[in-house]
Amino acid sequence: MDDSNVQKPGEENENQQGSSRRDFLKNLGLAGVGVAAGAAALYSGHIFEAKKEVSGDEKVLLTQDGKLVSVDSLEIKAVEKTGTALHTQEGREGIAGRRWVMVTDLSKCRNARKCISACQGAHQLRPEQYHMNTLQMQDTPGTAPYNMPKNCQHCDNPPCVSVCPVDATYKRPDGIVLIDNERCIGCRFCMAACPYSARIFNWLEPRDAAAHAGEEYNVELNVPQKRGTISKCLFSADRLREGKLPYCVEACPNGVYYFGDENEDAVTNGTTKETVRLSKLLSDNGGYQLMPELGTKPRVYYLPPKNRLFPFEEARDETPEKV
Amino acid sequence: MTRMNENTPTFEQITHDLSHHIRINKGFLAWMGFLTVALIVCLYAYSIQLKTGLGVAGIRDYVTWGMYLANFVFFVAASLIGMLISAVLGMLGMKWLTPITRIAETIAVAFAAVAGLVIVSDMGRPERLAYVFLYGRPQSPILWDVTVITTYFVLSLMLLYLPLIADMAILHRRMDTIPGWLRNVYKVLSLRFTDSPEQNRIIHRSIRILLILIIPAALSIHTVTSWLFAVTSRAGWDSTIFGPYFVSGAFVAGSAAVIIAMYFFRKNYRLQDYFTDLHFNNMGKVLATVSLVYLYFNINEFLVPGYKMKRADAIHLQELFAGKDAVLFWLVQGGGLLLPILFMLFRRFRKPLPLLLISIAVLIGAWFKRYIIVIPTQEHPFLPIQHVPHNFAHYSPTLIETLISVAPFILVLIIITLISKFFPVIPIHETAREKGIEPISFD
């Protein structure tokens, strides 16, 4: 309270009466705030006193974000398990020390589409939704046609991640580009930016949405799928965490896919389970990447369709006319 | 203007001419009733989209940005005119612009405000709009767009309001035909303006500062909007001139919008003495000039890649020039740009009615030009579109999508109608000053 509020005798006039009424109300308000603050202080003091009872038994605990903390055992109380937050946290950090890489051998692909159905099954995708799609390619009219499985290239310089306004799609240290459908706002800028058309969108309710409602969201599997959000190939990040090969790699009957760790310079064939040196596989077979001129630095390599095991056949289109 | 000099009007006369339309009449109520009903229909369509998902629109995994985004680009474009008229031409000292400035700023405010809403209709998860602010990443051009559009909207609103202060002071004292509540609004908005030299100096200086600030803000909004496309590698979007290409196209759309508004206000609010043939003639020259600049950028944008015919560009250009999109492309380029330029070279086509018709053609062309910029590029990505339903590969808008795209136009009309109905369309104070008439006392 400053001096200006003190009424000096003989100064009273109409105007001042008004202002002293205001002052009075102001003072009343201040007093009210003071009482409330005092009560709050007393109450918190009481809580503090009550908390002072300690068992002396300190427990060392691991917090959700991976820090070690010590807490008195009396202070520990059970909380609801926030699995999604945990998944999101782990899913953003990736698997330490790894640099996942995929090699697709085009000479072995006969468009069996087993990889696609395994993938669509695992990720709850509709039949027209692809994380992995086998395309029938012909580079120029004079060159031979071939089948090319195409998934997200998990670029080291991903245009999709650059343009995402909310950090919903992100690049992990282990090389995987993921999408967090609890963050995605559905602007589809990433789809516009991706030169490989690798991204899909849940335009309508996802497949079996009712059956999966209430399931905990797993960012490394991106299920349950959510309407109005993006989905894409995840290199089966959930399987990698369990030490297994991706769904598509495992499902291929023809030995098309190799998957592994660039740091170890080793990739394993999903069909034969044979592990080979990545650098040797690429150099012996003339490995290349899709559209390297765009500077996206893909983590998927292709081996050219040379000495093919199967003749090329026109694929039949089995998708519905309109969805 | 020449007509005015013959018998110089009094201040009373000017005030009456420029404010007699401020009354709620049957025509206004009928028009607003129509707009409201139309808006409700469109909002119903949007409620279906909210319930069912973005899939009610024709957009799918390949053409993922459709009419909504074309609409967004169009709305941002039209709003740029405020900057061209007020700042660029105004600061060059073109006195004939005085009666047009408020229309230009009204259009700027209305279109910029609605552009922000248009983009929400294109979101898969509109309820997460706040995430843009909570988790925004500055490297995404969407963040830049949100920032500059908000800035431009605020600057335009101030540029609309500051010249209005003096008019509010004039009107709240003089008008007796208007309802009391509106007079009170005027009184509050007039900020106790008494036409003192000091007040005029402050307002004048503030406007000048705003006029300078709004130039980079306006350039940014459409440049950044063009970058939503130009930062990708896709044929048709991967262009270094997209910024100026979009900005010059924006001036075309905005000038046409101003001419259309001038024509209707002139007719409905009986402003023939203020929007004279001279104003239409001059605006016709402005529209022809900006159209020529836009034509120049069009030639650059299509001829250079067309000369090289790199694989992806070639597919894109063949579709535009002679393929699936050719009819629309040539209608837009011919009817919306080339022919209007040719006509406007002749004085007789810069008379009010012919210029109105030309402007309508230009504005429709401008909308479809955005459609042509946004959609065909996505129909031929780098890798083939295979094993997907037919409607994934070929975009066609749905009825619901069309209704949702009409909603922003209705909103813009509502905003412009309300502003022009309750405030003078032409600045009274400035008009009187320029005619050398001193306003009668502001006691």
Image (tube, grey):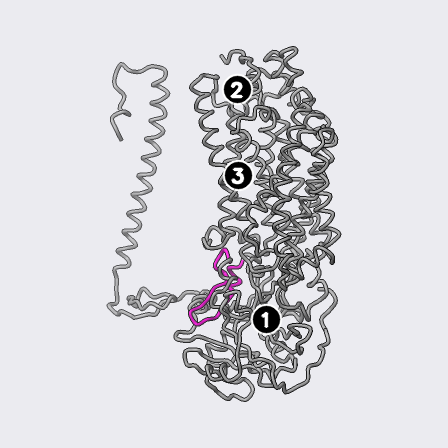
Question: Helix, strand, or loop for circle 3?
Answer: helix
Q: Amino acid at mark 1?
A: His
Circle 2 packing at 10 Å, graded few (<14), some (14-19), many (20+), is many
Look at the image and give the residue range highlighted in magenta.
A164-184
Q: Nearer the viewer, mark 2 or mark 1?
A: 1
Residue B429 coordinates in the image, percent (x, y): 55, 19
Q: Which label number is shown at residue A131? A: 1
Task: Name the residue nearer the viewer: A145 or A9.
Answer: A145
> For the residue carrying disc 1, how many other residues have a C-alpha within 10 Å: few (<14), some (14-19), or many (20+)?
many
Judge left or right: residue A81 versus residue B246. Answer: left
Residue B258, image x, y percentages: 64, 33
Q: Which residue is mark 2?
A: B169
Rendering quarter of residue B76? top right
Mark 1 belongs to chain: A
Q: Does residue A208 appear in this view?
A: no
CA–CA distance between discs 3 and 1? Answer: 41 Å
Q: Nearer the viewer, residue B151 or A54?
A: B151
User: Three-letter amino acid code at disc 3?
Assistant: Phe
**Quarter holding the N terminus of chain A?**
top left
The residue singled out by tag 3 in the image is B153
Is residue B377 among the parts visible in the rendering?
A: yes
Residue in the foreground of this view, choosing between A261 and A108 = A108
Subunit bearing disc 2:
B
